[in-house]
Structure formats: structure tokens, C-alpha cells
Image (spheres, coloured by chain):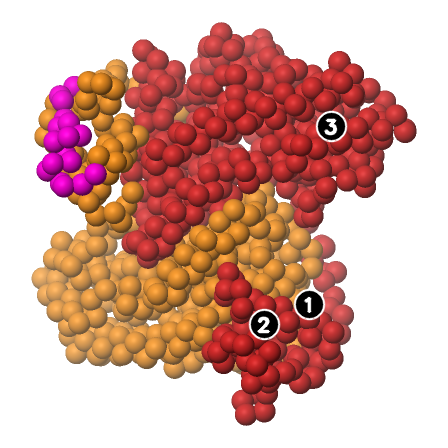
Chain colours: A orange, B red
Amino acid sequence: MQNDSTESAIENYLRTLIAAGRAGERLPSTRALVARFTVSPLTVQRAVQTLAHLGLIETRPGSGNFIQPQRVIGRADFSWQTTALGPARNSLNAVGTAMALEATPAIAMHSAYPSEDLLPIRLVRTALTRAARGRASIDRPPIGGLADLRAWFASELDAQASARASGIAPDDVIIVPGSQSALTSIFRALAQPGDAIVMESPTYWGAIAAAHQAGLVIVPVARGSAAPSAEALDDAFESSGARLFYAQPHFANPTGALWSADESRAILDVVRAHNAFLIEDDWAHDFGIDADARPLIAADTDGHVVYLRSLTKSVSSALRIGAVIARGPASARIQVDRTVTDLYVSQALQAAALDVLTDPGWRTHLTRLRSALRARRDALAGQIAAQLGPDALTFLPKGGLNLWVRFDDRVDVRDLVARCLAAGVSMAPGSEWFPTEPPGSFARLNFSGPHPERFGEGIAIVARELSAR
Amino acid sequence: MQNDSTESAIENYLRTLIAAGRAGERLPSTRALVARFTVSPLTVQRAVQTLAHLGLIETRPGSGNFIQPQRVIGRADFSWQTTALGPARNSLNAVGTAMALEATPAIAMHSAYPSEDLLPIRLVRTALTRAARGRASIDRPPIGGLADLRAWFASELDAQASARASGIAPDDVIIVPGSQSALTSIFRALAQPGDAIVMESPTYWGAIAAAHQAGLVIVPVARGSAAPSAEALDDAFESSGARLFYAQPHFANPTGALWSADESRAILDVVRAHNAFLIEDDWAHDFGIDADARPLIAADTDGHVVYLRSLTKSVSSALRIGAVIARGPASARIQVDRTVTDLYVSQALQAAALDVLTDPGWRTHLTRLRSALRARRDALAGQIAAQLGPDALTFLPKGGLNLWVRFDDRVDVRDLVARCLAAGVSMAPGSEWFPTEPPGSFARLNFSGPHPERFGEGIAIVARELSAR
């Protein structure tokens, strides 16, 4: 009954009474509520029913509504589970700061998600409403996803294919509920527990956690503002026997770094030479600023690249839709894993996503988004240079949502982040993005958050806390 | 632009021309299409844009629209992947017949999903439309799910708790995108690859596939119309060292069998004695006919029961929402696995689900559903008795969506199913529900499909194909 303001008002009023009252206490009658809020008895009843279904109100027909007694029970004993469960694959801290904060601080630069004004909200609302009215709210989709949505993802890549055309077909596309589920399926499907996987360092914390979940051993290769060197990658494959290399070639999270065309070719050659897979996470496909993401899979003919992309960040977190593109037996194996994991993705979300992507307004939105991201990136970079010194910003990225900042090595970043948060500014500690020990003191500052006008103020707080050490 | 009928008509017309034409051929001009369909140029352009985005049309500004050339490439070579990938956890056949059939046959009794007339479609559409308009189409939900939705699932169980109250709290509930993802997370979180898991036999094929995905060894305990015996279960735990027992105590898939209260108590005692978990899959919670599902977790104080339930089948496959309920360290471990797998579930779907469940129309719908299922179950059971003989139906289930039929042991069920399908009747071969060799020739017939008025005709075809052997 959300969005119906009178009903919400009645609900809130009753919740206040319940919070203040004792179990078993009588609540105002329907008649009294009708009079108080000047609404129909039906509206009152709907509010009461909602709270009754949530276990807050007990309705006794003919006698009235009462505050539901909370049952008191003896303390349960779960200690037997500790032995029964044995070792864990991921710790409780596996979830990064970018996701974990529940309350938004005054000046938020920790989040992984663009703020509302950077999203195509009107398109999303229209598309979801259409999906609600159509068959998409009833029908089960084909297992790999809606044919037209698969075709859209294929054609986006096809448009970028070089003369060495890869010929990606709609059948090569598997629709997934976001890129995190894509990652867990790909790792599980293409490797066995105990296998090695090569990753850039630093890299996305969600990929690190997904590799641990799949029981894989992470072999890091260092990466700064350029791609990892082909020699280092060759070494990593050779020494570990890994068949997988997970990477974000374009506007990598957290650094924003980009592989050049030459670097991409050299890396693909190494991957091919080792009969390995490059898992290309194109997370920032829609977040190019001074450059465009040019997926490596478009230059791959023999199925060495497994590609993933998600709409969650650029369209809406409510439309959790992404795509995996793979060819050959690897594709079949990922599809089986997806089916066993999820069966299929809600057709309502798939239809709404297709609707947004094929609307002419989507291209217009992307153009506006690019300018907005450029302005925000430059504003935050300017504040960092002015207030934290010219060496704080590692480099100015050509796309993405983040700036990667390096502090003096003696700075305890977890402590700094905690103190900044207490002062109203959030950022994410860099350690979360390293599969092994961080080689310095870093933090990730997101410039797509809700307070671009307060960047200066936010960085001033960081500078103050830094010097207060 | 689905649901906009003129636009769809233009799109379909162009698709026909594209299918019939050659690459590079010119398509009718915007002006010609405006005249033909008597619509605005904008509508024509939207249809053209959709097809352009799908890679079917090439638009050359100033010159017109053309059929996009399909690139011809050399045949790719994926053979290197075969060695690189190594052994597979699940075969391509892991997906059951209930999901795999793409086209619906004339008389469909294979599906796992109720037909449209058994779903609360009006409630679903209203709820999705509200979600589209509200904050749910923009905001990211808390990681474990919307607080009110978690409270709803907790209160449903709480209402059934006995004097030995389990005191299930909203925090014990984790919202998941359907029960299949719940299963894969639970198995992965509570066991290590190579561990044993006890399962009823027959049981849900999706649980068998999820156990294989997690690298578990399945230890079957036989089950007919009653629960597995406590002695057999004790034996299975003892000999395998298993810590997990997966079961469907109420209206089990595929048989429809139900554990009695005494059987449930005896089984819970065995589970406790072995410091083990009962994974209670309450898949048919909303499908009681002559009895109600009374979850065992309501009688569990110390976290031995991990409970799962999904709304996919009873509400809509578009609202892929379910819940896992667990207590103690097990709950924390499942939550970490869910976060690493999916991060979170679309808030639009969560808000819409809550809206349906707290609408007074939901209870009314469930009452109507019960009568409809009873009538269908009895009609199909009657036809089976009349046409396949009194011994064909194993027993009349008190709930669920299926009848479990046993044929003469010499019947090759895969062959029978294929011949019936060719004759226009679908059913699911029983072998898919056995973790090991089936002890006889079984088939599952679903009575919630789209053709209840043709049950007689359908069973007549089965009888004919049986005697034609």
C-alpha cells in the first residue's frame, strides 16, 4: 500500500501508538480513525490489515484491534552449529564498504552507485509500468533470456567489431540478474575448487569474494594506470597453471585505468598462448568520459574472451539485468550453472530493460551523463589537488565513477576513513580492492554521489583529519 | 516499445520485409510508412530505432533505411576449450523437463507452474505499477531485503508457532530471488565440496542439480506416501557423516506426500541427535488442498531447521521473490554467500511482492485457489483411475500441483513421454526426480496446467500409447 499517502499516514500513526503502547492494549476503532483522517473505512481497514500481516496488530472481529503481544522465549543455543559448519570460504567482512553502509553520511563518496540525477529515472518508470501491464508480468521467459534483449547486447558489441569480426550472435548472450551473479557463475563454471585465477591488483572486491566462494586461489598481477605487463601475465599463467584471467580493461574499479589498444593485443596474445580465458568485466561500459570502452571480445574469434556487462549502475538498481557473452563449450557450461543457480531472470525486469535500451531517450541520456561525469570528475580532482597536494591523485581517469587517491604510506587508512565518516564524509578504504597485502595507503573516492556541490567541503575534512593524525 | 500496438505493427511489418529481403536492400521510407499505417513520423521512427538497435536495420541519414548485412566470418575453433575446461559438475541434461520445453504442447501436464487463471494477475499488475511509480524503482534495498517483507515472512511462521515457540524474528529472514538460488546458497554455505547430503528419493530435480553444483555427494533415503523412516535417516547420517538433510515435508515434489506431525517430530529428533541441519523446502506452502503446510521450523528452537519458501509459483514468475529463514552462525554464513552471489534483489520486485501479500485480495485469492486445485486434482485422478486402472495413481495427495503415476516396471518412460508428446500430451518422466537409479517406471502429471477441460482426452492418449507398446 506504499505510495498511498493517507494510508501511509494512518499506518505511521498506528505504528507510533504500537511503539509507545503495551502488548494487548486496544488501538483506536476504525470509526475513530475514519473521523481523525477523514477517509473511508476501507482505507483504514487496508492500513490495519497491513500491520496485522506484519504481526504488529491483532484483530479480534467484533471487539477491535489490539497491540500484538511479542512472545518471550528462552534463549536459543546455536553453539552446536560452530562445529557442524567447519571452515568458511569468505569472512563476514567480504562485503565492501561500497555496499555495506546502511545510512548515507552527509557527504557520500564511498558508494559504488551513481546518484539519482545521473539515472534515466523517467525511462525506467515508464518501462516498468509497461512491463506491469503487458505479458511480461505473467509469462516465464526462455531460460537464456528474452530473444530481443540478447540480440540487443550482441548488436552493441557487433557495432564495435573490427575487420577481424567476432560474429557474436544473440545465442551467445546469457541474461543474468546483475554482474555479481555473472561472476560467481563464470568462476564456478570455468574452474574447479583449488584452481588458480589471475587477477589485476587492485581489482573489484566483489570479484575477489566470488573467487573465494568458488574455492579459487588468486594470483595477483600488479596494475597501475596502465595495463599489467604481458611478461608479468605470462609469468603468472606459467607459474600457477591458471586458465582464467579476470580483468577490467576499461576504467577499472577502483583506479579508473584503461588498457591501450596495443596493451590489449599483447594481453590477448598471452591469453591465447596459454589456452586460457580472459574474463572481461566491462562494468563501466556506459561511463566513458574522454574515451569509449572498446570491448576486447570484439577482436576475439575463438572464444578466449568471456564478457560481462551490467545495467544496474547505469540504468537502475531496480532493473538488475546484465549479460554474459561466451562462445563454445564455455558458454554451455555457464548456461547450465546459471540455470541451476537461478532458473531464469524475471521477465518483467528483462522487458523493462529492453524498453529503456531501445528508447531514443537512452542515447540522449548517455550523452548528458558523459558531460555530468566529466564535470564531477574534474571538480573532485581539482579539490584533491588543491587541498591534499599534487601527488595525492594517482592519475586522472578517462572514465568510470572513481578517483584513486594515495596517502603517505604511514597513514592508517581504516582509521582515517572511520574518522572522516564520524565527521560526515564517507570514502572507501583502498585495502578492500587488493587480493593480497596493499602496497601503500589508498582510498577510493566516488564522484558520482549525491553531493557534488560539497566536494570542496568534503576534501577539506579529509585534509583536516589527515593533518590531525 | 512493446504494448504500443501501432508501433508493434510497424515493427512486425519491417521484420517480415527483412526476413524476406536481401542484405543492403532499401526498406520503405518513413513517409511511406506514415502513409501506410496512418501514424506520426515519430511512431515510425521509434519502430525503426528499435530494429536498428537490434542490429536488423542500418539507418543512413539522408539516404534511408536498409537491411543490415549479416557479417560472414570464418568458422571459429573452440576445441581448445575442451581441455581447458576439464570435468563438469552437471550435465547439459541437468535441467528437468518441467523447465526445458520451450513450446507448449496441446495438452500440457509437464510444467511446474500453475496456469494463468490460478494466479493473482490483477494484484501483480497493480503492485508492479505502484513499484514503478514509487521509490522502489530507484532505491537500492538493504542487503538482506526490505524490512517489512522480512517481517511478513517471519510473521507467517510465527502465526503457526506452537507453545515451544521458535521466536522467528525479521532479522532471521533473508530475501532471495526465488528458491533455486536459495538452495544453491544454502548447500554451498553449509557444506564443503565432497561432503555428504541426505535427500529423500524421489525429490526435486533442482535440488539434486544444486547439490552437484556444490560438489556434494547425495545419500538418498526412500520415501513413498509417508515420510522417510527415522531409522533410515539415522542410518544415512551415521554411515555418511552428513550434516545436511534436504527435504520437502509438505506436498513434496513430485509425489505430493506429506509428513505427519509424529513423523516430523521423530525426524527432527534424529536431526538434532546428529548435530545436523534439516533444509525444509516449503515449496508448496500456498498449495494446500485437504491440509495446510505447517512448517517444522516453527517447532525448532536451536537453529536445526533452515527454511525456504518462494512466491514464484503462487504469485507470478515475474515476481521472483523468496525467503530463507535460518538462525545462528548458519544464517550469517548464508547471508555472506547470498551477498557474494547476488549483492541484493531488485527493490521493485520486493516492494511489489510485499504489496501483493499484504493486500486483502491475496487471502481471497488463496481460498479460491484451494477450491480450483481440489477440482483439478480430483478430475485428473478420476481420469487416471478410469483409463489407466486403479493402481496407476500411487496415492491422492493432500496438496501440491502434481500426481505421481506408476506404470508397469517394463514401461520405458522416456520413450512413452516422447510418444505422448508427439501425440500432443506432455508429462515429465519420473527418472528426473531420483538422485540414483529409479526403482520403477514413474511419471509426474501436473494438474495446474492450462487445459483442465482436456484431462480426459490427455489421459486417453497416454492409455493408447501405453497399450501400443
- Which of disc 3 and disc 2 is earlier in sequence? 2
In the rendered image, the vertical position of residue B95 relative to residue A283, given as above or below: above
- The magenta-colored residue range is A24-40
Q: Position of residue A389 (x, y in %)?
A: 19, 76
x and y percent of residue B182 in the render? 48, 37
Q: Which mark is residue B456?
A: 3
Whether callout 2 and callout 3 share a subunit is answered yes
Q: Say whether residue B232 is magenta.
A: no
Q: CA distance from mark 1 to mark 3?
A: 52 Å
> Magenta stretch containing residue A32, yes or no?
yes
Q: Which mark is residue A429?
A: none
Do the residues indicated by labels 1 and 2 lie within the same chain of the protein?
no
Q: Quadrant of the C terminus of chain B?
A: top right
Badge 1: chain ID: A
Residue type at mark 1: give it: Asp
| Number of residues whose C-alpha sits closer than 10 Å to that of mark 3, classed few (under 14), some (14–19) or many (20 or more) | some
Instruction: Looking at the picture, tell me which residue is in the foreground, A245 or B150.
Output: B150
Find out whether the residues at labels 1 and 2 contact each other: C-beta distance under 8 Å: no
Identify which amino acid the numbered label 3 is placed on.
Gly
- Kindly identify which residue carries mark 2: B10
Considering only vertical position in the picture, is B75 above or below B384?
below
Chain under disc 2: B
Q: Is residue A411 left or right of residue A89?
A: left
Q: Is residue A182 visible?
A: no
Q: Residue at x 60, y 78 (%)?
A: B36
Q: Quadrant for residue B18, please give it.
A: bottom right
Q: Give the structural element (helix, strand or loop) at label 2.
A: helix
